[in-house]
Amino acid sequence: MTKVVILDTDGEIRARIVGPTGAEHRRLANKVMEEALEQANLSFDEISYVIATGYGRINVPFADRQITELTCHARGVASLFPNAKTALDIGGQDAKGLKIRDGELVDFVMNDKCAAGTGRFLEVLADALGLRLDELGSISAKSTNKVQMSSTCTVFAQMEVVFRLSEGVPVEDIVAGVHDAIASRTVSMIRRLKIEPDVVFTGGVAKNTGVVKAVRENLGCEVLIPEDPLLSGAIGAAILGKELTLKALAKGEPIQRKERRLEEATFFK
Amino acid sequence: MTNEKKKKAINRLQTMYPLRANIDKMYERGVEASKAGKPTVWSMVNWWEADPILKAMGLEIVYPENYGAVSAAFGTAQAYLERSDAEGFPTHMCGYARNCLGYAARMKDLGEIPPEAPMGGMAKPVLLLSSGSLCDARYKWFQALGRYLDAPVWTVEIPHPGVEESQIEGAYKQAINFMVKELRELVAFLERLLNKKINWGKLDEIANDLIEINRVWYEINELRKTSPCPMHSRDFWSSMNASLYPAGDPKVSLKLYKDMYQEVKDRVENKIGAVAEEKYRLLFAELPPWHDLKIFDELAERGWNFVVETWAYHPPKPMDYSQINDPLERIATQTYRWFTGYFEDALKEREYMGYFAYPYLEYARTYQCDGALLHPLLTCRTATNHLMLTQDRLLNKLKVPSLVAEGDIVDLKLFNHADIMRKAEVFEEMMDYYQGERRKEGLEW
Amino acid sequence: MMEEAKKGLTRVREIYQDRTQRAKELKAEGKPVMGYFCLYPVLEMLTALDLVPYRIFGDMREPITRADACLPTVVCPFIRSCLDLGLKGKYDFLDGVVMCHSCEVGEKTAHIWRTYLNPSYFHFIDTPHTMHEAAQEQFKEQLKGFKKSLESFTGKELPSERLEEAIRAYNQQRALVRELYDLMKPDPPLISGTETLQVMVALAGIPVEEGNELLRQVISEVKERKDGPEKKPARLLVWGSIIDDVALIEMIENAGAEVVMDDTCVGSRAYFDDVELTDDPLEGLAYRYLVEIKCPRTFREAVYGETKKEHMADLESRFGYLKDYAKEWNAKGVILQSLRYCDIHGYEVPGLKDYLDHIGLPNIYLEWDYSKAALAPLRTRVEAFLEVIG
């Protein structure tokens, strides 16, 4: 997913877009940006500063600066939840743990090598079960006897769920088991940070109420979910951009901008 | 009909049972001793290099490597492994080490033995006895335990010469001298640590008992060379403990081994085999799948007799120790021979991994093996590194094929029982074929 | 018309691109080239018998295809790569190979190398695991055995004078390397971490006097040039497993940092301690090689035979030198890196992190698997680390 957030100097969100990325993402960040500008009723030249973050951050030709999604997420989470000290973000293809102190990132862990423990895990297994991602949460809520998944690998887990289904295990119990597997894996990863409350859970997977429940159980404490779990990275990026801009203005220095045009990335043509 | 089915495929030795019972008692004794205030040592298996000294100082010894297998079998390993990961230790490392690190971290949190720890757990040690032998984890792991335990670490040294280098004039003597000096330092250290003197007489006695235990145990294993083989690998693994660790009173162990020798000799004389019909003779390398030893029963029903196994657990070739007066020298000599005893023969055959790999060539020949079952382990490099070379040499030099079955020491799910059984028939065809090949080469079996 | 011989950093880059070229030239001149692995084969002994030491490295750009037949995949990828290159014939030009008990996989690989590659000369040095006095004596005995073996191979005796000469030459190289490293102390450093590693790799395959001359050229070039490295916001120290290719260092430097110091074996561990010239040269050699080389494969303890153990004191004795490095080179953060499956470094990480946290040095641990593809996700982590300490 490609997300855009436009923020003004009062900290008000003027636009928020979440667009599907797909194979073309590397060229089409500008399209999503255009959508956001329309929503905010602004022209591109009125944007003081653009920060790009996430995997594709080097492919945004109109960005003034790139900052890692780790720093941006931490900022975004801290702005939404001032008492947050730990954040867990599970996206489509990676999972991150962030340690936050005084609103800033101080330590982190990442899993971007293994599909298990990311949104991909749920995608693959939902597909194997013939279910939609958005119904997994409500289905698992009906479970009374969740399955203990034995496979740690997505590929083997896929075989395992099909096998269980064929054995007659109720689908809600399988889904609850899948949720527990992803929760246990990601919680295990963030334990390396010495977890402190408040704990915030973000990313597309945080929209799944079943996983949220499983994360709570595995952590043994409450987790806070933002209204829009997909935007904390973009919000954080925008906040950082705002801070850089205001700092420059206060010092009477020019805002360090690149020469930029709102167009497709050219180096893939 | 039901009674036929219930008859075990492997004809277990009666004398195995009391030897096996020793293992369970070891933990109980350890826990009781610690509760009674007796100082405990956590030790790596050290092939009798340090254990006799520890015993002569009256210490209770616990083996975390062993405890790793116990935790895995009881299903508590997972929690300790996760704790080790959370502590920041890389996940590829030895499963036993991760289990122990997680356990120690938890014990530090609680200030006492964790209540969920199986078999009474391992008590807080006064010393960590690590060893440079065979693998790096065995001293690095104990060093890393300094995060959770304030016990000092002592690393015993054992030379690891190359095959050719070991036969250089003077090399043997130097190696023994080196080990003896180190052991003397260990004695001095223990005397300072425990504020008491070693009982040299007791050390002498223990050293002699061990040498004798290993000699008898060696003779027992020599008897397995006949056909049908009277003793299955399962009995080896169940009975070996008293030859590797101090498991109770050495005199009792010695008697039990002597009893076993008698039973095995009787079987040889009466041509009684460990399986009903010995169709194939197999060797096994390296560490057994402790959690699924039943697979051997199933394979025994197909006529697979496992006649020799795990070089790392086999006793050293006996020799005459009577001219060696210093017990430390006797101990050092036995341990060194444990590791390098095959080197002379290996050199003659120009095989350069004189331990781990070469012994299997000698085993295959002298135990007349038709095939090998190899068990590479995901997190134990030491027990896995030599298996490919072993497979290659067995096949290309001796025309003995291998079946490979992957597993792990703590992630027990990796071992695929069904898969191995499916492959068994095909492997039998391979073993039949290679028997023909060996005849062509003029090999004797 | 004769092309002018390349000098300084240009020559370094030339050697770095293809280390075998110089070795093959030397062979054509009739000088035997002896391959060696890890740091315990004593280079002075080889040089004193007119053998050119050539360190065996892997190639992270070469896919491993042959080594899997001899070694499992779950072992150090650097060692697998070395063996793979050997099996592919890339080291056939060597006149012999010296290996040692570097780590357990290194030790096993030495025997596997011996078995499958059957070099015309092969020797295995069994490095003890500790620094105990008896271990030092044992290592000295190992060197005596090595000496006899080399004498037998070359048909020449190794006289003490030649050995002392070699020790002086190598001590000179060590001093020159330290002088080069000193040039990374200014801000910005006069030479980048990437360039320094290229020099280190180049040195590992050429005779000691050539290396000394090359170092002198590089030092004066770097002092005089106007187009040295730019100032960057972060100065880092890199600790850990072997780095024999600039890719990782380059990635870190491209992410916005200067790697001003390292604690790795192609770098500082090989050069930062001299050999003391003792009456019996083997004595000084044994001490320096076994005790002074700071690789975690050697078991180090605070007080030999201590009966009490205090975690932080133990860490201070094992890692205290890093505090000095960080201070002298003004490093603001430490990158701990190790290869996947590297046990000797892997076990150190939590304790070392404890120590670095204790002395207030920000640090991050990266595990990688000796491939270029592995580096891309690491870049995000490095950038995030720089953002945290920035």
Image (tube, coloured by chain):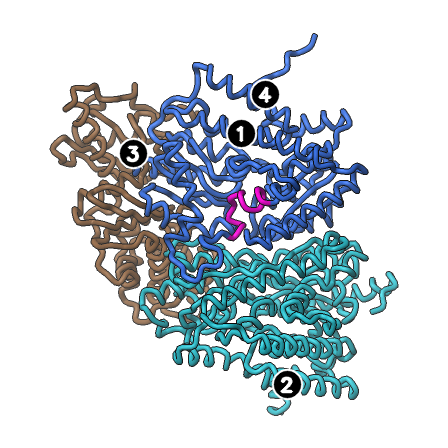
Are callouts 4 and 2 both on one chain?
A: no
Residue that badge 3 annotates? C390
The residues tagged by marks 1 and 2 sit, at their Cα atoms, a distance apart of 64 Å
Q: Quadrant of residue C28?
A: top right
**Bounds of the magenta segment:** C287-299
* Total count of labels: 4
Residue at the image point whose x is 74% and y is 57% from the top: B393
Q: Amino acid at mark 1?
A: Ala
Q: Amino acid at mark 3?
A: Gly
- Image colour for chain C is blue
Question: Circle 2: is it few (<14), some (14-19), or many (20+) Cα within 10 Å?
Answer: many
Residue at the image point whose x is 33% and y is 44% from the top: C359
Q: Point out the tag, 3 or 4, that comes first from the N-terminus.
A: 4
The residues tagged by marks 3 and 2 sit, at their Cα atoms, a distance apart of 69 Å
The front one of A12 and A78 is A78
Residue at the image point whose x is 14% and y is 35% from the top: A11
Is residue A122 visible in the rendered image? The answer is no
What element does badge 2 sit on? Answer: helix
Please state, as top left, top right, bottom left or bottom right, where the N terminus of chain B lies in the image: bottom right
Q: Report the mark closest to the observer, 1 or 2.
A: 1
Are callouts 4 and 1 both on one chain?
A: yes
- Image colour for chain A is brown
Is C291 in the magenta?
yes
Q: Is residue C254 left or right of residue B422?
A: left
Residue at the image point whose x is 45% and y is 51% from the top: C348
Residue that badge 1 annotates? C175
Residue that badge 4 annotates? C11
Q: Amino acid at mark 2?
A: Leu
